[in-house]
Amino acid sequence: MSSDALTPTPAHKFTFGLWTVGWQGRDPFGDATRPALDPVETVQRLAELGAYGVTFHDDDLIPFGAGDATREQSVKRFRAALDAAGLTVPMATTNLFTHPVFKDGAFTANDRDVRRYALRKTIRNIDLAVELGASVYVAWGGREGAESGAAKDVRTALDRLKEAFDLLGEYVEQQGYDLRFAIEPKPNEPRGDILLPTVGHALAFINELERPDRVGLNPEVGHEQMAGLNFPHGIAQALWHGKLFHIDLNGQSGIKYDQDLRFGAGDLRQAFWLVDLLETAGYDGPRHFDFKPPRTEDLDGVWASAAACMRNYLLLAERSRAFRADPEVRSALAASRLPELALPTAQDGLAALLADRSAFEEFDVDAAARRGMAFEQLDQLALEHLLGAR
Amino acid sequence: MSSDALTPTPAHKFTFGLWTVGWQGRDPFGDATRPALDPVETVQRLAELGAYGVTFHDDDLIPFGAGDATREQSVKRFRAALDAAGLTVPMATTNLFTHPVFKDGAFTANDRDVRRYALRKTIRNIDLAVELGASVYVAWGGREGAESGAAKDVRTALDRLKEAFDLLGEYVEQQGYDLRFAIEPKPNEPRGDILLPTVGHALAFINELERPDRVGLNPEVGHEQMAGLNFPHGIAQALWHGKLFHIDLNGQSGIKYDQDLRFGAGDLRQAFWLVDLLETAGYDGPRHFDFKPPRTEDLDGVWASAAACMRNYLLLAERSRAFRADPEVRSALAASRLPELALPTAQDGLAALLADRSAFEEFDVDAAARRGMAFEQLDQLALEHLLGAR
Amino acid sequence: MSSDALTPTPAHKFTFGLWTVGWQGRDPFGDATRPALDPVETVQRLAELGAYGVTFHDDDLIPFGAGDATREQSVKRFRAALDAAGLTVPMATTNLFTHPVFKDGAFTANDRDVRRYALRKTIRNIDLAVELGASVYVAWGGREGAESGAAKDVRTALDRLKEAFDLLGEYVEQQGYDLRFAIEPKPNEPRGDILLPTVGHALAFINELERPDRVGLNPEVGHEQMAGLNFPHGIAQALWHGKLFHIDLNGQSGIKYDQDLRFGAGDLRQAFWLVDLLETAGYDGPRHFDFKPPRTEDLDGVWASAAACMRNYLLLAERSRAFRADPEVRSALAASRLPELALPTAQDGLAALLADRSAFEEFDVDAAARRGMAFEQLDQLALEHLLGAR
Amino acid sequence: MSSDALTPTPAHKFTFGLWTVGWQGRDPFGDATRPALDPVETVQRLAELGAYGVTFHDDDLIPFGAGDATREQSVKRFRAALDAAGLTVPMATTNLFTHPVFKDGAFTANDRDVRRYALRKTIRNIDLAVELGASVYVAWGGREGAESGAAKDVRTALDRLKEAFDLLGEYVEQQGYDLRFAIEPKPNEPRGDILLPTVGHALAFINELERPDRVGLNPEVGHEQMAGLNFPHGIAQALWHGKLFHIDLNGQSGIKYDQDLRFGAGDLRQAFWLVDLLETAGYDGPRHFDFKPPRTEDLDGVWASAAACMRNYLLLAERSRAFRADPEVRSALAASRLPELALPTAQDGLAALLADRSAFEEFDVDAAARRGMAFEQLDQLALEHLLGAR
């Protein structure tokens, strides 16, 4: 493959959160290992590496509780850096988890004043997001949950969560903003159990909102894998519902704490099938990296890992293209009857199905049972493509 | 508490699958340890123990591939046993997983003829289910899934799954049956990854069907816990959507193979919160036990474990009543501001929220952050009630 | 049961780490929610609650990098508080994880100077531990591990780990200290994978040391459960090897991030079997709580959760006593042939076993296979005792 | 790379269990999907594919309970097939799990007669194993465990387990057999919790035996990964103890039921580091595949998956060689200070370490903390080698 195909450009729509490369390495057992990064420097560096855009939480850009002057100044510097670097801001989000006021949640905190504050904090940053050109607003409800059974009445909490999204939708509509919301599910951490723990739960929730069309998902690789779920399967279902509004790419090594490894690290085979799906399904949103360079790294390691996220995506996309173009793969897909899955089961209609004796009374079950599916041959082809061995 | 409160009666609506007490103990590494049970004996024994009903897969009652005479005879004997024992059949389901013809799934098998056969097999048993009085028809798609990435195009498979439920709904409607479907999610086993892996994914899927009102859920304790999810939280969300049509009660010790322990074994605290939720939320469907008496047990152990399922439910219901009635608990709930969660966040409307300076500009964030939630005191009260120590 | 039996006293040997009640609630996504606690206040409060002792990391007591004057002053105040309160210090340990210098580990850091520094830091605190009366010195190697495959040569790292414990053993022996080491295993977090991930791996490692008798274990409930392992089983094996030198009691809800819930929360049935094991096996070391009061709590919640740890232990000990004293339980144990497990399989010797035709040639395998184990009846008795329902 | 390097030959020491390709596809929810394979055919086919040997459970070769004539005949045919094909039998093992008599275990069954029977059954097959040339005898205690807390006294059970291995060792010694035992750990399935659940627990156990030198390990990829453990780390520790007597290679997709996927499927990155470790550590035993071709496959799929196991091993070995030979990798290893980990921490001895002011008093902790470990650059090189992209 040409090295050009592996060089990131803005056309690839790679984006990074300010908080990713900017993570200072504070973890539950340790202090920061890296200095704070100036968002302006981040913008410059990411542009040099070939990124398309950056994203942010309000507090990444403007210190929590800063006055109007600081706020304006921060935004002005940031916008100037974006313009200079040619980077976009396709997404923004709210920090509703760091300050202790959110210790019991934000939109579903038991305390009503905390809920109201959370909504106002969100609305304030929505204005900024739109001003900076964002079309997607992510909502990660990391603190909406509980560690014990009576602490949260889940049905009531879902009422409050619906109320929050309905109010935010009303606001955005009133302002005439061209902005959609993307809910980011997570099963646990930092709460013992978080509401809307998976892609599925969030998809179901959206259907109960007043403006379901305006709300979709921002699934994150590691979050679904923390529940042992197959991430490409979850993304396929989100696409099937028309709800993949945004995506968070990173790596996770199985069911444990949230690792946020660089994309490509962790479950490599799922990473391959994910890229294969995104590239063949026509997903055209940002490829957003939400990762944390391990705290063992200095800033050189930070930028190396950011570059590697993009390079790994492009490498896997190359592998996917070669896999799909391989005539032997096409034969193997046919041998596994994938084309037959695409045929309706009963385009002849229910009555015809019921009348079809070959479908039941005269169906040779044992003969059908003897047919092998040839999945191992197919999967081995995929594995060899992934390994660059074909 | 009175021992009467712990004696199961049909009013408690306890039901058991024929396949539960009838499980012979065949597992992936071992042969059967118990003889087959005659469904007639099962009916008698369960009635003696105080059950309300039994449920069945088609093949539990009528051997796979049996001719019409055997079929009629089996049904007749079963119905006579039910009548004699006074047991109901509130639910039935289809075995679409044991025969090797279903090795790649049923409604989403790559082979179209297998899909058609699966639909016909299901429809045939729906007729019997209705004849025997069932009002819920469960669909566990245990074989709908894959072990490898290219073997199943998930979006296409979801198309087929939707097609199947739409056809079944059409059939039931045409026949004028008063029957609703309940999808039973499971994340994996026997497939590497199963479609609709959690309560959430299934709830979302239902919204895409032609007759969403006719389809709900049959969640199983162990299935959600196999993904590390909080089962009472999942049930609360299912209730919130109005979709808890049926429930499978059993026990599971964490993320591992599907254990199907008796109800009460496994995660005891979740079992408590589950019963508390079902009893306080007004769920009035069957309390259906879908468990497997461990293969170490003989038939005495089988009936002892069946009796224990019911007793444990009743014990936990007693503990829940005492918990909810305890004035100290009510104070603790208030101290944790649960009543405040029930208040709308902005019944004053969006405009008033935006205009309310006390909600943001003048909100004392640090003072609010200092308020403790008192969840530990509340949870300790719950634990002591559970332990019978108050 | 009498309330006296549930009132903690120093005779129960309950101990707490300074860092437990003193945890300020900083987590990977949030800032501190509680003020720092003065160790002197902690000592007073724990004594009032009935504790027997406190334990500490060097940096809990003396700020990292403090000069000698501060150090002496801190120790003096602490010792005075201990004397006043009548509390002991049975255990101490080193903080080898918070400062960024330990980001790649301490005894197995790739950097030799970091390893040397870690040893000296440990030795310095061993002197203080002994001075304060500790007889056990815990070593949790939380940062000894890796996130990626080439970053750590595990065999070489184990050489370094052995070297460290050999040097520490040499030091302690030279000083004539009556001090034993207790290794605390953990599978992951804060590293992707930690060396000596379970009780078993640590037990095996000890056998390679120069002074294996001086080194044992400090297993922690949640750490083993983070690997899905049965904690009482692990403790039983540690006891079997004579290596349970100390124990960390807390709660964990399955395989996920390290929760450090109060003892009794999390897996209640394992907590019961653990207390049953400790009380019947004659473990006479401290019952040490290593938990973190959830960050939702204020200081009232902190002290309430500390008190609840002890109360739950005493409640479970009561339940265990009643279980073991119940004649029906004794019958059930006999029915399950537990007494027969205690008989040697071949006290007649190998030759006799080989010559015994009843053991093989004439053994009625099928008859033996039909015997039920009656485990369900036994386990139900245990569950009812736990629920206080007998 | 040359295709020759990817063609399996006996020199590669690839071996397969008769029960692997011979698995008929019976799972907890489904009947067999494939016919039984004649061991003679298996031997022929594996030899054609390039294998070095086959392994077996007694009951794979000789039907359970067969008379002496059948036994002799089975062995004779098998031996003739081996001779004709030029295959070896480097390992054998006992089936102590399929027959219902073992439902509560074998060496630790509560029933003494079952324990005696299990020992005799094992001894009988040891004779055959030695006769066929095996030098390793594997012991997987899959049924040694429990589903409930009182059903098994773990310390007593470990006494019985030790007794069993001591008796077997005595027998082998008396017979003058050149045979070593290899314990195969597994955390759960088919029992709720299995004794000796991980590599670590088994390593520790061995130290208590009368003949520890004669007993080592047979770790299986999927078994450790079912506990979320890093398999290459476990193997490294087993090698460090000199206890890697044999190894079971397969694939597993995270913490769930035992999948036994073909080698290479599942966690590909761990597979790479495993091969890298085995090839660089000088492990010279068999590369034994203990996998189950998915039940979706017919016999073509079975042989394809067997061939793929070997090919994937060889592919990963190629990738490992290239990785280790790459000068950029060597620089990266140096930049990550791996060579420094190989230096003793204190070859100057304890006294010198204590006297070295540069080690503590004058150590610049903050400067050391600022050094980056460069692990991300190193891991990205490894990933690109794995992907065949360098």
Image: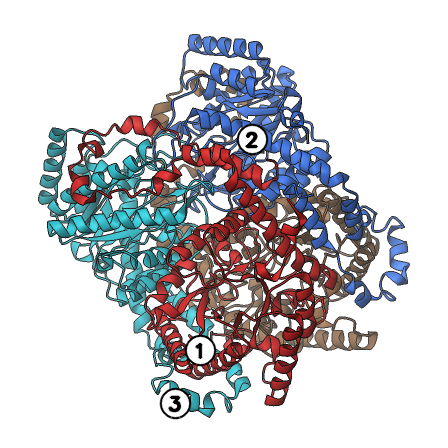
Chain colours: A blue, B brown, C cyan, D red
Q: Is residue C322 visible?
A: yes
Whether pointer 1 and pointer 3 mark residues with C-beta atoms closer than 8 Å, the reply is no
The amino acid type found where label 2 is placed reads Cys
Distance from disc 1 to disc 3, alpha carbons, whole Å, reads 20 Å
Is A172 situated left or right of C202 in this image? right
Q: Position of residue B243 (x, y in %)?
A: 64, 47
Is C332 situated left or right of A303 in this image? left
Tell me the residue at 66%/75% (across/down).
D81
Tell me the residue at 37%/56% (across/down).
C201
User: Closer to the observer: label 1 or label 3?
Assistant: 1
Tell me, yes or no, whether dots 2 and 1 are on the same chain. no
Q: Quadrant of the C terminus of chain C?
A: bottom left
Distance from disc 3 to disc 2, alpha carbons, whole Å, reads 66 Å
Vertical arrangement, residue A5 with respect to residue C214, above or below: above
Q: What is the crowding at mark 2: few (fewer than 14 residues within 10 Å), some, or many (at least 20)?
A: many
Q: Which residue is tagged 3?
A: C352
User: Closer to the observer: label 2 or label 1?
Assistant: 1
The amino acid type found where label 3 is placed reads Ala
Q: How many marks?
A: 3
Q: What is the crowding at mark 1: few (fewer than 14 residues within 10 Å), some, or many (at least 20)?
A: some
* Quadrant of the rendered image containing residue D70: bottom right
Q: Which residue is tagged 1?
A: D177
Q: Chain of mark 3?
A: C
* Secondary structure state at the residue bearing disc 1: loop
* Secondary structure state at the residue bearing disc 3: helix
The amino acid type found where label 1 is placed reads Tyr
Between B271 and C287, the one nearer to me in the picture: C287
Q: Position of residue C330 (x, y in %)?
A: 35, 77
Q: Which residue is tagged 2?
A: A309
Q: Chain of mark 2?
A: A
Q: Quadrant of the N terminus of chain C?
A: bottom left
Q: Position of residue D354 (x, y in %)?
A: 17, 40
